[in-house]
Each structure stands twice: as structure tokens, then as C-alpha cells.
Image: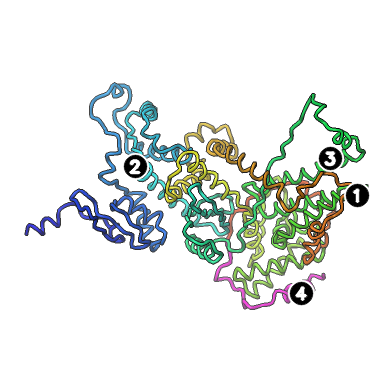
Amino acid sequence: MNENNEKKRGRPRKCIWDHFTEITNDDARKEQRSGAQCNFCKQKWSRGKSSEMIAHVALSCTEPPPPEIRAKYVSILRNNYEQDDDEQDNLLPNKKQSKITDHIEKSTITDEKQYRCSRALTKFFVCCGVPFWIVENPFFIDLVKSLCPRFQLPGRTSLSNNMVNKECANVIDDVKKDLENEKNLTLGIDGWTTPLGQSLYVFIIITSERKEYVHSLRNFFKESHTGEFLFREISRVLNDVGELLKEEIVKNLIKGGGLKQHLIENEAGLFSNEILTILKRRNFFREVEDLCSILSPIKKTIVALEHKSTTLVDCFICLLTMAVTIKELPQIGSNTFQIQCQAAFNKRWSQFNFDLYLLSYFLHPYYRDKGLQDDTFRIICEKALSIWKKLGGGKESANILMVQLSEYSLYYKPYNLDFDLKYHTAKNWWLMCRQKNNYIQQLALMINSITPHNVSCERIFSILGWYMNKRRSKLHYTLLEKMIRMHSYYVTNSRTEVKYAYKELKEFDDEKFEDIVKKTIYFFNDTEENDINDEDEENFNKDEDFDENHEGNFDDEEITKDDEVAIQLNENKVPFENLVNLNDPKFLQALEIEIFIPIPSYTEITETDEHGDSNYDIQTIVKDAMLKKGK
């Protein structure tokens, strides 16, 4: 009888233990907790704390439990989170002794205000890169108590565990709500090695409105980074998120560094006779002018392609602008510089999936077929139908899409609406084009929603570098994942997450306010960016496109075999000018206007659409449509 009573003593275990196996410690003491092992990923804890176990299943289990189980504990973590008894000691004591502040301010604080202040405190530590131990610093405590005497500050452990876990659960739930109505998404992937040798991969979801959300941060230092392994991980992310954009994941980055010029004044003696000879040459200033003319579009391209709202159209326009600039370089005298620029352009052009960029240009209502050669329409149609087929479109819907592409090219109804840059965006223009089986509209909005760069991943790694290098070198990657998820969400939704600051700065518009937020929380990128730029400049001279022994005199230089190879790299591709007429006046006029238009999401192909037979020949459909069009 006594033995049964002893077994029933204590509080009943929480339901989280249904998913964990109890581990008996060797040094078994009455006050010592039992160990625990996760039934999903087999991770072990020497002391089984219910708070850590709930957070593990809800946020960081590497072998995800069933969705309903994870959703259950995310809800518990968000709404009914309870601290362990031994963690209550981390809270500062709520003394009952009367203080002088009781006669000046309210002696109590509501639960709602305590909760609101706790959330604000968590956001501050996560987004500003402040070490968690600061919360126990006497000067910080004095500051907070001066502002709100009755606010109960958490301890360091409670802040980095309980409060971060709960706030991360809030963020995950809010992100799911934001993604419920999204269809056209871009998945950004990149890897980074930490100072501790960990191989971290970040998976970022980018919406068609260019909102950035961190899906997960994984540590693959124990895994072999083969293509098959990464494919499995990407597939897992795609299955977890739901309907994502599966056409293409952009892997190539355009990296740019600054040009450093050192102007020497009043030091004429430093100039050698060779330099003076070059300056006196008749063609020197013409060559400098040519160099400036080509560097200007390159600089604009680097800035434009890393913009948050950059689309495939912007990349294509930058390519065309550079092509026109190179073509207009003077042909008088030695044209070696012009030839080398053309060779470099051809080499980089061969690395692009040109057909996809060409399709995005055609589907933008401002450009359409401006400057495109007659035969280019066939290439565009073939690319459009190949994408449509991958998305599940059948023969019937492909024929309808082909007709719609032709009518769009000829400005037939409903595609004869004017596009005014002052009033229209690509989104509202396409939404105004209403018709039955509007397949071209679905395709256009999907193509223009692709984010063609991985700048978001680089930004995440800069933040991780600050967390690990500058302040906390031993944070576990699971805590980093929670912090980086929260950080990206807060920055993306800064207008609603920092409401008081938004009201104080109401004289600024939304775009300026977002810039202010980014400047205040990305201030720690300066040193790292300088380091990266220095490294890029060191590697710049080692690039295969440049000769280390090059003296800078192009007059008598012959084209090397490498240059000839570069010129012929696109030999198997359609020549650039056979696709685009660089002398078309309408085309040249369109290039003078730079636009960056974020394209919101729209519906994709649904299973209820009647597409017909999925086995069809793209070439036959294009050929029949071209005959009907009269080309």
C-alpha cells in the first residue's frame, strides 16, 4: 500500500512525454530529473525538462514529427507555455517591500503589459545583436527599472530559452498565415562555414512581393554534400512548405566590388616618364572615355541585380544595355578593347538561361516584343510551352496558350490596354486582362515573381557572422535558427512589429522607414563587407579573364587563344543580334527607363483545369500557330 502511494507522488507528467523515452541516470537522486530521448530524432538530454522537450518537438526536431503533433506543440508553446520550476529562479524576485516608486508610479503592472514588454525585449536582443548576458547586467537592469519599475526582467537562461522559443513559435505561426495565399514562391539556398567549422545551409522563402522568411537553418557538417543529398534536403523543404516555385533555383551570384582610386595632388614627381608618355598620347582620353562608358552600365547592373525587387526582366534589360554600350564603342584606331569587351560579354551571356530571360522580357507589358527579331517569337513560344508542360498543362491548354501568346504579341483584345509607368504595375495590368482560361496571365505572373539572386542568403550569413564572430562564438545552431527566423520576420514586417517607432517616425513614408530599420540593424555588416571586398579584390587579379602580367597597353597586343575561345563560347547558341535588333528605335527608347516592379502572387494551374492530353509535341503546336499567325 505504501509502495503504491510512493509511485503516485508528485505532479502528473505532461503530454510531451508521450513522444519521449525516459532515460534513468546513473546517479539517481530524488531531486535529480530523469533523462529523455526523442522518439523521432533520437536526440538525448541528461535532464528531461518539459520546456526544452516542447520546444524541440515544435521547432528544431531534425526528423519532423507528424504535422498535427508539431502544430499542437507550436500552439502550446505560443499560448500556454509554462516554465520549469528550476527556471523560475532566473527571474528577479518580486519583492513585496514598499518602494519610493510606489508613490510615483503604479505599483502593479498588468499581465498584458508584462507580455508586451517581454516581446519587445526579445526583439531587441535578437535583432540588435546584443549578448543575452546583458539582461543580467546591473546597468541594464537599472535602465529598464527606470522606465518601468514593475516590469519583471527575465534571467539570461529564461531569455535565451523560454522567451526565444515562445516568440519563435509566434513567428512560425504568423509566417504560415502569410504564406497561406501565396502561390509563386522562390526558394533561396546557400551554404556557409562557421568559425567553429560547422557547415550551415540556410533555406529562405521569398514571396512574389519580395518578403523574405527563413524556413530553416541546417547543420550538415557530418554529411557529405553530394548532389543527391542536397536534392533530398531541398525536396524535404519543398514538401514541408507546400506549393513552391519549382521551375528554377538561381544559383549564380553577381558579385561586385568597388573601384579604389587614389588621387595624388601636388606630387608630380611621383609620376614616371612612362605615365607621362601615356597621358600625352592622342588616344589616351578617348580610351578613358570608352572605359567610363562601359563601366557605368556595369556599375548600374551590379546595384540593380542585388536590389530586393529585382526580377528576371531587370537582368535581361541590364544585359541588353551592356550589349548596346559595347556595340557603340568606337571602331576607329585599335579596336582591341572593344573586341575584348565583346568576348567577355559573350562568355557571361553563355552562362545565362537566355530563353527564360527572353520570355520574361516578352511577358512584361511595357516591353513585349520591342527590339525582338521576327524569328525570336518562335523561341519564346517554345520556352513558354516547355514551362507550361512542366507545370502540368496538357495539349488543349497548350494550344490555347499559344493563341494567347500570338494575340498578346499583336496587341489584340484584351491585351490592347495601354501601359503607363506612372499609374500601372505589371500586376494590375495583367489582372485587367480578363478572359476565360487565362493561361498567359498565370504564366506571366509566375515568371515575373522569380527572384533571380541569392542576396537574401548572403545577408543572413552576415547576421550569423555577427552573432558568432563578434559576440557569441559558441551559440548552438538550433538557437541560431530560431533567432534568424525571428530576425527575418521582424525586418520584413517592421511596420507592424515596431509600432511605437513607426508612429514616432510617421513623417517618413513606408519605404524610408524600412530603410531606417535596415540601417539600424545591419550596422554590423560594415566590417565584414570590407573584409569580403578585400578578399574579392585579391581574387580579382587571379580571375581567368585577366592576365597577371598585363601592362595595360592594348595598342600592339594580339588576341590570345583564351580570347578566341571566349569569343566562340556561344558558338552553339543563336547569335545575340539574331534575336534582338539593337538598332530598333522603340527598343533603345525603352532601355532608357529603369523599372523595378515586384509582382504579387496569383493562381497556378489547378487540377480542375481541362488541359487535355499531357503527351504532346511542342514543336508541332508552335509550327501550327506560326502558320496561323502568318509568320
Q: CA distance from mark 3 to mark 1?
A: 15 Å
Count of numbered circles in the view = 4
x then y, percent, for residue 272: 84, 32
Query: Which of the marked residues, 3 or 1, is nearer the chain's N terminus?
Result: 3
* Labels 3, 2: front one: 3
Q: CA distance from mark 2 to mark 1?
A: 71 Å
Q: CA distance from mark 2 to mark 4?
A: 68 Å
In the rendered image of this protein, does residue 600 appear above or below residue 407?
above
Q: Are marks 3 and 2 in contact (CB under 8 Å)?
A: no
Q: Which residues are magenta?
A: 603-631
Q: Which residue is mark 2?
A: 158
* Quarter containing the C terminus: bottom right
* Along the viewing direction, whichever of 176 and 565 lies nearer the viewer: 565
Q: Which residue is mark 1?
A: 331
Q: Are marks 4 and 3 in contact (CB under 8 Å)?
A: no
x then y, percent, for residue 476: 42, 48
* Labels 2, 4: front one: 2
